[in-house]
Image (cartoon, rainbow, N blue to C red):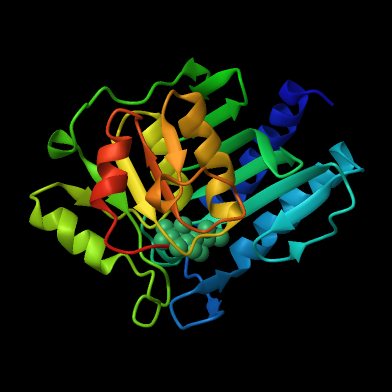
């Protein structure tokens, strides 16, 4: 399959999962916790992941899978699907309409296409490496804000925020003390998609996983933005911190965030 065909398969899978989420949204959602009481898993995380993997396994029998709820299937294959079946589980479980499905295809650990699908708004963000990013088929571009002091930012905090040294609290305090507007949506993949769409100018977070970032980071890069780790280190999906911007404010944001060394 070429990149376009892989993206098409990812979009079909994401929409199928999105339909499941839309049908369940607002009902009473039962959940259990994993690794801390606020890190929830619902039946919808599991159903969506099964649906996505079944579809993609049929479409690409020689692919490996790295998916949030089932882990790494094997690493024997060149192509790996990186899947977050429901990003924003806490929002979903509490009836807050901010969540999405995130799927990327990677070869040798490098994402080549990705989709972030927000089923309630029917917004489908897609990217193909070297070919740009789109929202519902329309070309996407990052914002043109050139200074941090004029920027609107978004961030997130890990589930174990009270004990994790990479908790973003000091950085958040520093940014908010500068008078900057900062949002916390609760969905890393949407945070990144919104950078790609020019809705936010900058985003940072730590303690993420490959499935939170793989598709969204490609969206940012293909929409003309920049992605790095803390300290400006070159982005790689195996690392857990991320700074994503429109490119113009990247160095300024990276430097301002340098209170912790992650
Ligand atoms: C979480 C969300 C959240 C981020 C957490 C993630 P989940 O993913 O992306 O915004 O702050 O670190 O784990 O658990 O909803 O898939
Ligand atoms: Ca996630
Ligand atoms: Ca998830």
The answer, for residue 200, to whether it is visible in the render is: no
Q: Is residue 76 above or below residue 106?
A: below
The residue shown at (60%, 53%) is 211
User: Horizontal placement of 228 versus 23: left or right?
Assistant: left
Give the number of callouts.
0
Residue 129 appears in which quarter of the rendering?
Answer: top right
Q: Is residue 195 above or below residue 213?
A: above
| Ligand 3's quadrant | bottom right
The residue shown at (72%, 40%) is 106
Instruction: Report the quarter where the N terminus lies.
Output: top right
Instruction: Report the quarter where the C terminus lies.
Output: bottom left
> x, y percentage for residue 177?
9, 57
> x, y percentage for residue 48?
66, 55
The answer, for residue 217, to whether it is visible in the render is: yes
> x, y percentage for residue 197?
38, 29
The residue shown at (69%, 35%) is 12
> x, y percentage for residue 167?
35, 70
User: Horizontal placement of 148 versus 229: left or right?
Assistant: left
The residue shown at (26%, 68%) is 169
């Amino acid at each position: 399959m070429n990149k376009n065909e892989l993206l098409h398969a990812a979009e079909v899978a994401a929409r199928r999962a999105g339909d499941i989420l839309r049908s369940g949204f607002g009902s009473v959602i039962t959940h259990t916790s994993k690794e801390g009481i606020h890190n929830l898993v619902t039946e919808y995380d599991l159903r969506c992941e099964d649906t996505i993997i079944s579809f993609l396994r049929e479409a690409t029998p020689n692919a490996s899978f790295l998916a949030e709820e089932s882990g790494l299937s094997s690493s024997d294959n060149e192509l790996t699907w990186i899947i977050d079946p429901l990003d924003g589980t806490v929002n979903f479980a509490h009836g807050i309409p901010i969540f999405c499905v995130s799927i990327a295809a990677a070869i040798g650990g490098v994402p080549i296409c990705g989709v972030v699908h927000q089923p309630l708004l029917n917004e489908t963000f897609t990217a193909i490496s070297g070919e740009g990013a789109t929202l519902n088929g329309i070309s996407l571009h990052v914002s043109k804000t050139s200074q941090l002091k004029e920027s609107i930012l978004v961030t997130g905090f890990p589930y174990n925020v009270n004990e994790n040294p990479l908790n973003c609290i000091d950085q958040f305090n520093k940014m908010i003390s500068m008078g900057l507007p900062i949002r916390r949506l609760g969905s890393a993949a949407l945070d990144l998609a919104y950078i790609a769409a020019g809705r936010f100018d900058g985003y940072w977070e730590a303690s993420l996983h490959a499935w939170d970032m793989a598709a969204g980071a490609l969206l940012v890069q293909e929409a003309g933005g920049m992605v790095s780790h803390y300290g400006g280190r070159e982005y790689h999906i195996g690392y857990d911190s991320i700074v994503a911007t429109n490119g113009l404010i990247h160095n300024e944001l990276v430097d301002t965030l340098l209170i912790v060394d992650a």
